[in-house]
Amino acid sequence: MKTIRRYFAFCVMLVLLSVATVVFSQEKFWQPTTGPLSQSSVWALAIHPNGDVFAGTYNNGLYRSSDNGVSWIKTNLTSQWIRTLLITSQGHIFAGTYQQGIFRSLDLGHTWQHTSAGLEDSTINVIVVDFSGTLLAGTNRGLFRSLDNGESWINIYPNFTVLTVMPISPRKVFAGTACWGLRQSLDNGENWNILNIGLRRDMAFICYNDILCLIKNSIGHYFVGVIEEGVFRSLNEGHTWQKANNGLAAGPVSAFVKDEFDHIFAATGGGVYLTYDSGDHWVRLNEGLTNTFVRSLAASPENYIFAGTQNGLFRSVVPTNIKTFVEEANTDIPTTFTLEQNYPNPFSSLAASRFTGNPTTTIAFSLPRPEHVTLKIYNTLGEEVATVLQETRNSGTHRVPWQPENLPSGVYLYRLQAGNFAQTKKLLFVK
């Protein structure tokens, strides 16, 4: 009788384990946060040494969470337009803003000081700290350095729009620029050289790719995210670059983050992608995202991944079972032709691209099989005003940016033709 009972109990345990496995495998990778950030455009994320999460928004201020994103409180920072965040190992918080310079808090965001003396540009694209504790701030008028914890700044690399900065060693630093690609300094910013081999845009005669983000993994591979062509990788410390877009839809790659397993996550205009093999392959992790234009990423000490989007902040489940989500993401292939609503819509110079400052919108479409694709823009009179795309694309979801040139404000129509499929939608451009 005991043997029968034990056998029955063992069978029940197996059933429960199998049910739990099925439930977990169906769990969404992303969970939306609630409260004031559920509808905000989150441009910047950072983790405090005590584990608190800070989220900077576009026109809604700076927020802090002490419970891994379950609840949020608004800080006392007066600026509402947060573009970038830095939190040092000492817990000092620096908020780079749109047209208002840099603010600093030494007490978890309760009080703030305006620390922008010497900055020639009040719009801050990035703030980092190097190995010596020196602060570096990238602006549209150059790269600035502070030796006194932000009290004063000097321009060490003028005449370039600096979008991202990554210290490599005590004297070595990379700077990603708009149009002019990647720069390197080997003497702590005194002199700079060019690292652009392989980074030229496919259809540009002068400009190199806008470098939006940089990261290095544990085996010494470098990655840059660019505005139009996805990810480039270097295996030789940045001297030469090659595209590393296998599985990654082209489009702006605005942020990278690593988890404790050295997985690299990329924030793109088409959602979040993960590479678990040093950039050889990328898989999409969008299950649960209701907005896939992702601008910012952060990883907490508890190994949660936070994703700030154009419309809401999301938090991952703890990715200890990342393999489950990777396998599911690999099967995420469109089954029908679709044309999505452009985003943002309406769009204008005020809500312009964070990276170029120009009014840009993104048009997404999905193809279940390779097709020759034509995407054109028309005015309300039916006159063609722009050809956005005219080429063969593979199956998958594609996102194409469009920037109006010399067009007035108004309603326009965009039409996708892919094989026998055709669809038209409206968009609104406001100068």
Image (spheres, rainbow, N blue to C red):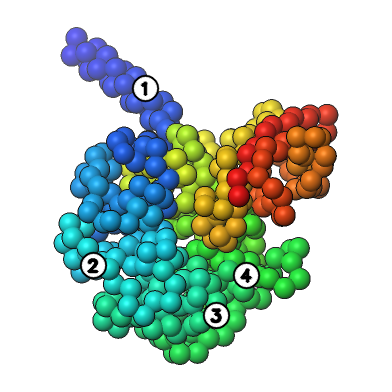
Amino acid at the residue labelled 1:
Val
- Nearer-N-terminus badge (1/2): 1
Looking at the picture, does residue 340 appear above or below residue 229? Answer: above
Looking at the picture, does residue 239 appear above or below residue 413? Answer: below
364 to the left or right of 155 = right
- Nearer-N-terminus badge (4/3): 3
Residue 70 disc label: none
Amino acid at the residue labelled 3:
Asn
Amino acid at the residue labelled 4:
Cys
Label 1 and label 2: CA atoms lie apart by: 54 Å
Reading the image, the residue beneath label 4 is 179
Residue 113 disc label: 2
**Mark 2: few, some, or many residues within 10 Å (few <14, many ≥20)?**
some
Q: Select label 1 or label 2 by which is in front.
A: 2
Residue shown at the point (65%, 58%) measured from the top left: 229
**Mark 1: few, some, or many residues within 10 Å (few <14, many ≥20)?**
few
**Mark 3: few, some, or many residues within 10 Å (few <14, many ≥20)?**
few
356 to the left or right of 164 = right
Label 3 and label 1: CA atoms lie apart by: 60 Å
Reading the image, the residue beneath label 3 is 159
Q: Nearer the viewer, residue 98 or 266?
A: 98
Q: Secondary structure at mark 2?
A: strand
Residue shown at the point (53%, 39%) measured from the top left: 329
Q: Select label 2 or label 4 by which is in front.
A: 2
Quadrant in the rendering for residue 16: top left
Residue shown at the point (57%, 85%) measured from the top left: 193
Looking at the picture, does residue 187 appear above or below residue 309? Answer: below
Residue 19 disc label: 1
Residue shown at the point (75%, 34%) measured from the top left: 380
- Nearer-N-terminus badge (3/2): 2
